[in-house]
Image (cartoon, coloured by chain):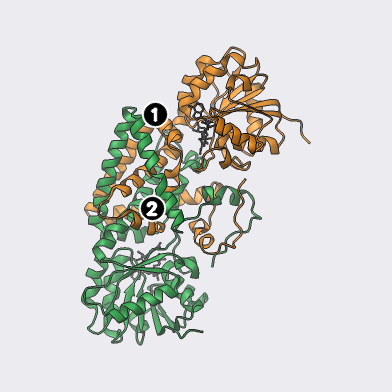
Chain colours: A orange, B green
Amino acid sequence: MAEPLFDRIALIGIGLIGSSLARVIRRERLARRIAIATRSPETLERARALGLGDAYSLDAAEAVQDADLVIVSVPVGASGSVAEQIAGTLKPGAILTDAGSTKGSVIRAMAPFVPEGVHFIPGHPIAGTEHSGPDAGFAELFEQRWCILTPLPDTDPQALARLTNFWERCGSKVDIMDAEHHDMVLAIVSHLPHIIAYNIVGTADDLETVTKSEVIKYSASGFRDFTRLAASDPTMWRDVCLHNREAILEMLARFSEDLSALRRAIRWGDGEALFALFARTRDIRRSIIEAGQEVDAPDFGRHVVAHHPQTPQPEEG
Amino acid sequence: MAEPLFDRIALIGIGLIGSSLARVIRRERLARRIAIATRSPETLERARALGLGDAYSLDAAEAVQDADLVIVSVPVGASGSVAEQIAGTLKPGAILTDAGSTKGSVIRAMAPFVPEGVHFIPGHPIAGTEHSGPDAGFAELFEQRWCILTPLPDTDPQALARLTNFWERCGSKVDIMDAEHHDMVLAIVSHLPHIIAYNIVGTADDLETVTKSEVIKYSASGFRDFTRLAASDPTMWRDVCLHNREAILEMLARFSEDLSALRRAIRWGDGEALFALFARTRDIRRSIIEAGQEVDAPDFGRHVVAHHPQTPQPEEG
Ligand SMILES: NC(=O)c1ccc[n+]([C@@H]2O[C@H](COP(=O)([O-])OP(=O)(O)OC[C@H]3O[C@@H](n4cnc5c(N)ncnc54)[C@H](OP(=O)(O)O)[C@@H]3O)[C@@H](O)[C@H]2O)c1
Ligand SMILES: NC(=O)c1ccc[n+]([C@@H]2O[C@H](COP(=O)([O-])OP(=O)(O)OC[C@H]3O[C@@H](n4cnc5c(N)ncnc54)[C@H](OP(=O)(O)O)[C@@H]3O)[C@@H](O)[C@H]2O)c1
């Protein structure tokens, strides 16, 4: 049995990400003790009932005392105030990280509060589902997924190595890049897809010529693929849009420009242009499947799962 | 054992849809004989090797001889020429239907060739995957899915009842509507999602600041959900865009208008507007799951399937 990597880990925020961390830390024995803090008594009680930690508190400042690793997993708009709360009780030599989906804004919000001697290394696990809260987490969430760390120029290499090791023991592969590049990459691979999904579901919801019940009945023909992303947590996504504004607006501008060209091709009946666009997008999917970031069951195996309830379902939790 | 519904069924086109029909017709014994025709010798040989029918031909006119039910499953741009080819050999009293994703254009293309005494009832099974060809089909494709029939004003009610019964025996639920309404509904639930998916994958592919390998690595954060639709057959989707142009352009205009409002909210940091939009789209997904058109495994169970290859996989076939 390997030695625990940390004596005490504090998890601030115990939703999908925080509770998945709690579960994998426990399973892999990555810490001797897990201290949990969250904002509301309800969520704290739920975490306690699920047995996610060893100590529970509504006071983040209390939870981080004596912690060697502090992981903040709250909506990015709350990062600054959490940093402010815990600044006074962070242990010298501790590593402070987060899981926020934007990185430039988190650094701007948190860094000013981080005391000398604490290693602040922002991070972002590229893993998630559309569900929220402590019940939604599961220990396997990070397996085979990438985790991006965006260290600051003066980050201690040993602390970085320790945090890298932590994420690898959670099952992740770790990439290092600067925060600005992270925000650009995530704008296209994550933020734009979510925004587009929210938008198309909103458009469908507003139509007078097509009823909502028709949209629901016939959704298997394409629409439903967007609804998973559009069912994600509104607070988290509001914060992402507010905190990665520049990169998102740039990607939206490009997307809209491309869409105008596509509209023009449809309007003018330019079959060749349409075929050319529709043909070049296939090999991206093939590459994603080869990279192990997607499963190749046609339709994700949904058609069969839906009809044969006796088919063994992948377990959650 | 129920009597076969038809003595002889002819399938013109034996790709994903045609071959799924062949398989379910055989499994449910819906016909005594299945005649298959397709355009290319390669596809015909594959259909023969898979044992999908009882007779095989490269000549659609030959295949429909003596058939009581003829189902045309080819890209919608080819419907007219297929109708022209088979017009002379269709049996009086036969039912002629199709599976095309657009209906107004198919009626305009096929109806002029349909001889007196043949019951032409256009149809569209709302079921599919991103895969094509005779190997991609499976008998369960239509189960629990809707099939829309768009009869013409003078359609014989008995023929309509027989075709409805056929689709029900394939596992589908049948809806009847006029072609114009079908084309509007499908523009939003299917055509727009596919076009948007193709567009976003194209946008990502063109970026200079983010590499293709980064898009692939981090695709689990949202992007990959679009790639399934964007991996669909380019010929089919070119034809859909060319043949449902008006309805698609209307939906694209609305989508773009809504997206402009969303961009404005991001640009001006209007968190309330963003939250309001992101919050109202959730219950559509819940309704889709309740309607049995989607499975509720978070992440479609992809995270678990991807790591535990021993997890029993839904069977295909
Ligand atoms: N969900 C994903 O797919 C995903 C993936 C990668 C990264 N992330 C990032 O991970 C972070 C957490 O996401 P999540 O999905 O775990 O969220 P979640 O399930 O909604 O949980 C959020 C947690 O943050 C707390 N919280 C919410 N608002 C707060 C505030 N104003 N001040 C202090 N605490 C607050 C919540 O506390 P109470 O419940 O007690 O109010 C809860 O403990 C976010 O920054 C998100 O961008 C998410
Ligand atoms: N895929 C879906 O998700 C889906 C769902 C509902 C409805 N549909 C509709 O169903 C129809 C068939 O789609 P599919 O997915 O089955 O397509 P597919 O797998 O690509 O098969 C197409 C079939 O049509 C034949 N074909 C192609 N071009 C032709 C032409 N110019 N003239 C005559 N035959 C031609 C092909 O013959 P060869 O291989 O011999 O060339 C093949 O037999 C389309 O109208 C589509 O809109 C598709």
In the rendered structure, which amino acid carries the disc numbered 2? Phe
> What residue appears at the point 54 percent right and 46 percent down from the top-left corner?
A293
Q: Quadrant of ligand 2?
A: bottom left
B56 left or right of A311 in image: left
> What residue appears at the point 28 percent right and 41 percent down from the top-left corner?
B258
Q: Quadrant of residue B114?
A: bottom left
Q: State the image coordinates of residue A204 (x, y, percent, origin top left).
A: 32, 49
- Residue lying furthest right: A1
Q: Quadrant of the C terminus of chain B?
A: bottom right
A182 left or right of A51 in image: left
Q: From the viewer's side, name the closer residue of A108 and A164.
A: A108
For the residues labelled 1 and 2, say whether their Cβ atoms are less than 8 Å apart: no
Q: State the image coordinates of residue B295 (x, y, percent, origin top left).
A: 50, 55
In the rendered structure, which amino acid carries the disc numbered 1? Leu
The numbered disc on residue B2 is none
Looking at the picture, does residue A34 appear above or below residue B206? above
Q: Quadrant of residue A52?
A: top right
Determine the chain carrying the residue at label 1. Answer: A
Secondary structure state at the residue bearing disc 2: loop
Q: From the viewer's side, name the closer residue of A103 and B261.
A: B261
Q: State the image coordinates of residue A169 (x, y, percent, origin top left).
A: 67, 36
**Marks 1/2: CA–CA distance:** 27 Å
The numbered disc on residue A242 is 1
**Few, some or many residues within 10 Å of mark 2 (<14, 14–19, 20+):** many
The total of numbered circles placed on residues is 2
Secondary structure state at the residue bearing disc 1: helix
The numbered disc on residue A223 is 2
Q: Is residue A83 visible?
A: yes
B298 left or right of A201 in image: right
Looking at the picture, does residue A41 appear above or below residue A81? below
> What residue appears at the point 43 percent right and 32 percent down from the top-left corner?
A240
